[in-house]
Amino acid sequence: MSAQSRHPFVVAGYGIALLINNAVADGPLSAYKLVPRNAHRIIDWLFVVALFAGSFLLDVDQPTRTTLFAMAVAIIVIALTTNYTKKVFRQP
């Protein structure tokens, strides 16, 4: 039994979509500030639903299912501990 996936493009597709989501969100480390933080929060939870659905509904092998499930759990932890409010800095 191997830990390598026979379907690497499934995990790669989810990963690329997640990177794009983080790159365009209005955050301190984002490349392009196209998506407001409230929409980013909703998209994060949609990713969780998509990852859970993918881990149960897609016809993939067990390592891919486990990876998708672990990604969903990781995003849940990150989303629950993230402060989505915009930081306001006062001018001296």
Image (spheres, rainbow, N blue to C red):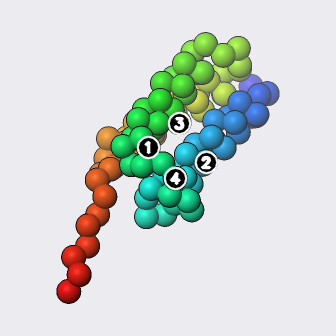
Drawn side of residue 45 relative to residue 65, left or right: left
| Quarter in which the C terminus is drawn | bottom left
Circle 2: residue type: Ile
Q: Which residue is mark 2?
A: 20
| Quarter in which the N terminus is drawn | top right
Q: Check if mark 4's residue and mark 2's residue have beta carbons within 8 Å.
A: no
Circle 3: residue type: Met
Residue 14: percent from left, percent from top: 63, 36
Residue shown at 29%/63% (left/top)?
87
User: How far apart are labels 4 and 2 at the CA level?
Assistant: 11 Å
Residue shown at 58%/43% (left/top)?
18
What SS does tag 4 mark?
A: loop
Instruction: Looking at the picture, tell me which residue is in the foreground, 35 or 1.
Output: 35
Residue 74: percent from left, percent from top: 46, 40
User: How far apart are labels 3 and 4 at the CA level?
Assistant: 24 Å
Q: Could you say which disc has been placed on residue 71 in the image?
A: 3
Residue shown at 69%/36% (left/top)?
13
User: How far apart are labels 4 and 1 at the CA level?
Assistant: 10 Å
